[in-house]
Image (cartoon, rainbow, N blue to C red):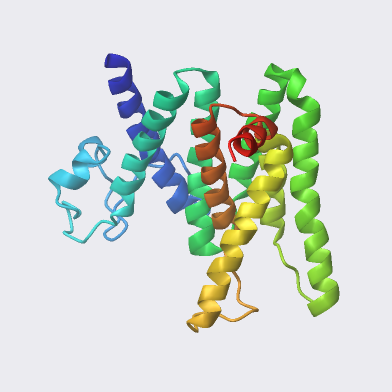
Amino acid sequence: MYEYLFIILTALALGSFMNVLIYRLPLKQSLWERSRCDHCGITLSVHDLLPVVSYVMQRGTCCYCGKRISVQYPLIELWSAVIAIGIFYYNGINRSSVECIVLLYLITVIMIVDYRYYIIPNLLVIILGLIGIFRILLNPEILINTLIGAVTMAAVPVISSLFFYLVRGGTGFGMGDIKLLLVLGFYMGFPGSIVVFSIAVIIGATVGLIGIVIGKCSRYSKLPFGFFVGLAVYVFILFMLIGKTDNMWLLWKNYMGQL
């Protein structure tokens, strides 16, 4: 009981910091300055920054200027708690669960930033990469599999981009997408990396086709592929938790055996 209360409070606090990353990284602002109101610029006090609670108590407005505060702030904070509780509940309170939660927190920030600004901050990619390398150092037996996954994740979009360049003179993927896929290979391994990339492409292609049909975009429109990769990671981890395994081959064989 008490451990889950601690988890919720910690997750809400981390969700608040996720909001800081989402807002400040694209604007290249310092992450360590005091928080200010987006509208009037007044420095906020501690009681103005309590995750979820402050938003509810202030009825979604700034208590100094009365302007509306984005609902993104409490939603991200609540979502961070949902992620933590869900993974700890299904996978237990252990190191692999913590790794999974951190991965999803960082992926969530990347998804929102890429969706809004079409950029993937290098800082987040570097953090993901360092954690991935640290994970390999703690589990040397996964070295070969994760390296294959990383190379595969990076090679496929590079080859695809070269193909796009030769065919229509443009690139299919940005460098931010390729770097993100590379470091995610450290987590997904092989063939998980292929699964994640395939799901992301399917989601992206579906969204693109729907956009073309309803006239919201053209075949040359730019799409936030990092957002689709994030969705694919969520789907992948969901199936890993349901299958109670981090081995994609085992999960696939078990699934095929039930058909």
Image location (x, y in percent) of residue 158: 80, 57
Image location (x, y in percent) of residue 41: 30, 55
User: In this rendering, does residue 180 appear at all?
Assistant: no
Residue at 81%, 72% (x, y): give it.
165
Residue at 54%, 58% (x, y): give it.
114
Quarter of the figure with residue 56: top left
Residue at 47%, 82% (x, y): give it.
214
- The answer to whether residue 103 is left or right of residue 36 is right
- Please identify the residue farthest to the top as the structure is shown: 2
Where is the C terminus found, in terms of image quarters? top right
Residue at 19%, 53% (x, y): give it.
60
Where is the N terminus found, in terms of image quarters? top left
- Please identify the residue farthest to the front as the structure is shown: 259
**Vertical placement of residue 197 versus 1, above or below:** below
- The answer to whether residue 32 is left or right of residue 178 is left
Foreground pick, 76 / 236 = 236
